[in-house]
């Protein structure tokens, strides 16, 4: 699969964004680590997906028209049995009135350290890469660093050093330091997407969890598309 295979059909359908499922597929094409997940369109498919992934799992609505899933109650986490998955699937389906592509069954990624990684297009500087403290505290701490794309490993490391809460990237409460090589690769890859895919307007990876072993994993992602390019 190529990036065009995801983006051009979405633009043809009039989408202003890729769904979470599509967004993560795009990120994975660039080697950015994402959650293991499967798209289901029935309770039976959701149960089968959960069995394949292994419990514990989470369920989320996947739709290009749905951006703030948690605020609309479209997420169920820490599901530990087939019965939990069936109940969660039914509740989620009944909670949304818009058209969806299905329900994502997703592995639960352990870790309390959360980052946000993103891309914006500045009118003056073009595509810019962003790194910051993520999760629910993104807007509270406003602890971010930016660089114009393209960036290399030196620039990516410098971004991490600029964060006021950079200590969380090191060994933290018995957990290993972040895999800096993979974090740098992620930042570099996001910049590549901005340079290579003019149809992409913004990228928001939030949260990107740092696991206790130091891995980084994109747990949620959104790719916005440009309306002025077809």
Image (spheres, grey):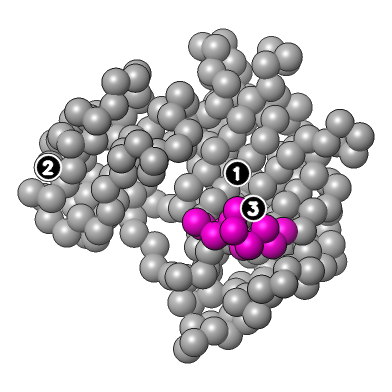
Q: Which residue shows up at 64% across the image and 53% down it? A: 117
Q: Is residue 109 visible?
A: yes
Whole-number angstrom distance, CA of label 2 to CA of label 1: 30 Å
Q: On the rendered image, what quadrant is the N terminus found in? A: top right
State the extent of the magenta-drawn residues as a range.
Answer: 132-144
Q: Which residue shows up at 86% across the image and 31% down it? A: 123
The crowding category of the residue bearing disc 1, from other C-alpha atoms within 10 Å (few below 14, some 14 to 19, many at least 20), is many
Numbered tag placed on residue 107 in the rendering? none
Q: Earlier in the sequence, mark 3 or mark 1?
A: 3
Q: Which residue shows up at 84% across the image and 62% down it? A: 155
Question: Which residue is at the front of the view, 6 or 226?
Answer: 226
Q: Which residue is mark 1?
A: 204
Q: Earlier in the sequence, mark 3 or mark 2?
A: 2
Q: Which residue shows up at 70% across the image and 30% down it? A: 201
Left or right of residue 144, residue 171 in this image: left
In percent of width and height, residue 68 lies at 45, 37
In percent of width and height, residue 46 lies at 21, 40
Q: SS at mark 3?
A: strand
Q: Is residue 64 above or below residue 163?
A: above
Q: Is residue 52 above or below residue 226?
A: below
Q: Which residue is mark 3?
A: 117
Whole-number angstrom distance, CA of label 3 to CA of label 2: 33 Å
Q: Is residue 105 visible?
A: no
């Amino acid at each position: 699969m190529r990036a065009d295979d995801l983006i051009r059909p979405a633009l043809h359908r009039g989408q202003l964004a890729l769904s979470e499922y599509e967004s993560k597929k795009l990120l994975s094409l660039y080697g950015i680590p994402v959650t293991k997940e499967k798209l289901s369109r029935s309770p039976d498919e959701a149960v089968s997906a959960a069995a394949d992934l292994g419990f514990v799992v989470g369920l989320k609505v996947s739709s290009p028209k749905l951006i703030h899933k948690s605020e609309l109650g479209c997420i169920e986490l820490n599901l530990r049995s087939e019965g939990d998955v069936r109940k969660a699937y039914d509740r989620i389906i009944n909670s949304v009135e818009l058209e969806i592509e299905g329900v994502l069954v997703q592995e639960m990624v352990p870790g309390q350290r959360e980052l946000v990684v993103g891309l914006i297009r500045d009118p003056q500087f073009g595509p810019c890469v962003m790194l910051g403290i993520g999760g629910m505290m993104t807007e509270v701490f406003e602890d971010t660093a930016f660089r114009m794309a393209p960036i290399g490993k030196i620039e990516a490391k410098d971004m991490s050093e600029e964060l006021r809460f950079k200590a969380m990237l090191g060994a933290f409460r018995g957990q290993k330091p972040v895999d800096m090589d993979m974090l740098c690769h992620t930042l570099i890859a996001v910049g590549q997407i901005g340079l290579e895919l003019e149809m992409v307007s913004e990228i928001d990876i939030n949260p990107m969890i740092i696991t206790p072993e130091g891995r980084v994993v994109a747990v949620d992602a959104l790719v916005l598309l440009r309306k002025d390019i077809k």
